Amino acid sequence: MIEQFEEAVEYLQNRGVKAPEIGVILGTGLGDKFVAAMEVELTISYEDIPHFPLVTVLSHDGKLIYGTVHGKKVVALDGRFHYYEGYSMQQITLPVRVLKMLGIKKLLLSNAAGNMNLSWKKGELMLIDDHINMQPDNPLRGQNFDELGPRFPDMSAPYDPSMNTILEEIAKENKITLRKGVYVSVIGPNLETRAEYRFLRNIGADVVGMSTVPEVIVANHMGLPCCAISVMTDDCDPDNLSPINIDEIIAIAGKAEEKLTELYTELIKRL
Ligand code: HPA
């Protein structure tokens, strides 16, 4: 595995990806506006990067974009991998390992999620303060890479409190509604039943999605500070549930992207 990370890193360095400071992972329906806010130097298709999995979901692109935001060197991953696509946990988190080995100091993630908190509504953003891992596997299962991180990583504050404070300040200054809560990660790809939404709400989650947690576990394993924002794309009230419409989810994510881009570009400026 380590050789695979190193081969991908070497390839990207040879293509000109040098000393990035910040990594950004863009979720479902998110990406175009953030990339438009970058001064792009290089766009590299995942197909060309050794050992990178290929994106199988239509709403995701599959490219690595290297450039600057407010003068800071950024690598953005436009297109992420999910366990439901059939990849192993090690494969879906390989990009995070590679970004860390390229030198990033901070990781910013985003995703689309279902909203189970009845005092919030779809279209709003939620800063992830904590998570519950309900995925059936763990990227750290198996041999530990001691050179990358400990066997039993601490998860007492998986989302960097100082970045979260800055994001909340930016939201306030710019009058962006930014909720704060708990994300639960499930395998998918089916959406939840009413009984499952009720269960997930009762165990303490505000939003539910199919990504992010594996990447955050790996980032914490390597001591890489990260933050994550969910775009709440659908309201999941078990007592009043309408059938899900994936096109609507993608459209709502697209609409919220402007605010997400504002938060993340300003955060990058202040880091
Ligand atoms: N459930 C799981 N994942 C999701 C949802 C949902 O309701 N909405 C967007 N991603």
Image: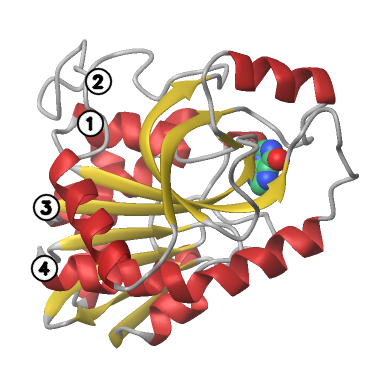
Q: CA distance from mark 2 to mark 3?
A: 18 Å
Can you identify the residue that label 4 sits on?
270
Q: Secondary structure at mark 2?
A: loop
Can you identify the residue that label 1 sits on?
220
The amino acid type found where label 2 is placed reads Met
Residue placed at 72% from the left, 58% from the top?
Answer: 249
Q: Residue furthest right?
A: 243
Q: Quadrant of ligand 1?
A: top right
Mark count = 4
On the image, the x and y values in percent for residue 106 come to 17, 52
Q: Quadrant of residue 219?
A: top left
The amino acid type found where label 4 is placed reads Arg
Query: How would you rate the neighbour count of disc 3 (Cα within 10 Å): few for under 14, some for 14-19, many for 20 or more?
Result: some
The quadrant the C terminus occupies is bottom left
Q: Residue 105 has which mark?
A: 3
Q: Earlier in the sequence, mark 1 or mark 4?
A: 1
The amino acid type found where label 1 is placed reads Asn
Q: Nearer the viewer, mark 2 or mark 1?
A: 2
Q: Secondary structure at mark 1?
A: helix
Q: Earlier in the sequence, mark 1 or mark 3?
A: 3
On the image, the x and y values in percent for residue 239 come to 85, 28
Whether pointer 2 and pointer 1 mark residues with C-beta atoms closer than 8 Å, the reply is: yes
Q: CA distance from mark 1 to mark 3?
A: 12 Å
On the image, the x and y values in percent for residue 264 come to 30, 66
User: Which color mode does the image show?
Assistant: secondary structure
The amino acid type found where label 3 is placed reads Lys
The quadrant the N terminus occupies is top left
Nearer to me, 125 or 160: 125
Query: How would you rate the neighbour count of disc 1 (Cα within 10 Å): few for under 14, some for 14-19, many for 20 or more?
Result: many
Cβ of mark 4 under 8 A from ligand 1: no
